[in-house]
Amino acid sequence: AQPTTTLISTTKAPTSSSSTAAAPSPTTSVPSGGGGGGGGGGGVCPNVPSSLGASVSTLPDPFTFAGGQKVTNRDDWACRQAEIKAIFEKYELGTLPAKPTVSASYSGSTLSITASTGGKSISFSVTINKPSGSGPFPAIISYGSYGASIPVPSGVATILFNNDDIAAQTDGSSRGKGKFYDLHGSSHSAGALTAWAWGVSRIIDALELTKSQTNIDPARIGVTGCSRNGKGAFVAGAFEPRIALTLPQESGAGGAGCWRLEAWQNANGYNVQDAKEIVGENVWFSPAFNSYVNNVNQLPFDHHLLVSLVAPRGLYIMENPDFEWLGKISTYGCMGAARKNYQALGALEAFGYSQVGGHNHCSFPSAQSSELNAFVSKYLLGNSGTTTEVFRTDQNLNFNIESWCPWSVPTL
Ligand code: MCU
């Protein structure tokens, strides 16, 4: 189904004295100091603050802990990633449960997976379509049982994941429905995006157990999905470090978009999906998120920090500017900020954002083929010399990313 869309020309963008849209200044700046330097030295991370902290109308600083300490090295970064993950779980996505006991069997092209915890079990299966040849093969896990909506390059297997079986996403009445909730209880805090990411982790557990039968290499796994399932693929890449390449397609708001940018756009005459709308439409997020959707400046994160959890692993984000509802400006600005995570880690080549129009929703444009093939070549097929880095839009967005990022980028 096509999303509801309203096309509004960028000339309706908020006007300012310069022609470049500028972000409002923060209502309160992020507290500085307090911790006296690095927070993660010796493997001891700062505690995740129990309260929200200062409201901020620009995009929160990836390189400052919620308590104010600066991130200055890789140990700090690992701590900050743990903090960001905990913050996403608490305020937006719900709790990602610990690994259950997993068993698996492989027959024909079907991988059957059983997960058990707390005296309960659930089973689900995925279909593996392999290329010809002897393998072992890398594989792309594709959300939806209908097949990937990106062209999967030759030499790569496709694993069809019926994510709706794990957590339903028909509409608001889907809360607590699906196998994840049969196992963890229908009032578990996880929204569907988290439940599906948990399912992806179980697929990788099963691939590790059946490696000699499936001939799939569990160290070379990609994940993709489009639209709502693109949001899902993004969260799987953020929550599961065994994923080598994350390929979210047209994920829009709640995926590559930032809540603050969508709110700002809608306050200035656009009609973009935003936090207020999205929580009424479906059950992708935790019920905990409902408390924040009317004032997203309270959130100690935005979706550029979802990318902090993926970095420095491979990430190629495809967006379609023909649907304003998906956040043509929001995803561009948000991922422009997100790119700085990779810059800090000296890993810009692993980050791609590509916004190309002229095609239907979830129909892959040939203009992106060479970029997609390059990311797959490098991060799944092991051709390390391939050039991948990309950050582009085919639109004249006239948007100033820097005005939303009033923080400096360290070298970590
Ligand atoms: C981009 O993903 C969603 C969008 O968030 C919804 O508002 C719309 O209804 O559906 C899109 C989608 O999943 O389309 C297939």
Image: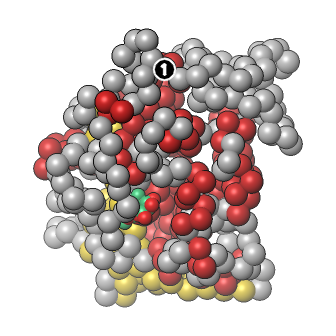
Query: Circle 1 is placed at which residue position?
Result: 22
Image quadrant of ligand 1 equals bottom left
- The quadrant of the picture occupied by the C terminus is top right
Q: Is residue 101 left or right of residue 8?
A: right
The answer to whether residue 169 is above or below residue 227 is below
Q: Position of residue 326 (x, y in %)?
A: 39, 50
Residue at the image point whose x is 25% and y is 71% from the top: 130
Neighbour class for label 1 at 10 Å: few (<14), some, many (≥20)? some
Quadrant of the rendered structure where residue 361 is? bottom left
Q: Is mark 1 within 8 Å of ligand 1?
A: no
Name the residue: 35% across, 56% down. 5
Q: Position of residue 3 (x, y in %)?
A: 37, 62
Residue projecting furthest to the top: 17
The amino acid type, in three-letter code, at marker 1 is Ala
Q: Please tell me which residue is depicted at 59% across the width and 30% down the height of the picture.
A: 59
User: On the rendered structure, is 246 left or right of 410?
Assistant: left
- Label 1 sits on a secondary structure element that is loop
Residue 385 position by quadrant? top left
The residue sitting at 74% across, 31% down in the picture is 55
| Residue nearer the viewer, 282 or 240 | 282
User: In this orientation, does residue 71 appear?
Assistant: no
Going by the picture, which residue comes out furthest to the left? Answer: 366
For residue 98, above or below residue 38: below
Q: How many marks?
A: 1
Image spot of residue 76 (x, y percent): 69, 27
Quadrant for residue 371, please give it.
top left
For residue 116, above or below residue 338: below
Q: Nearer the viewer, residue 250 or 62?
A: 250
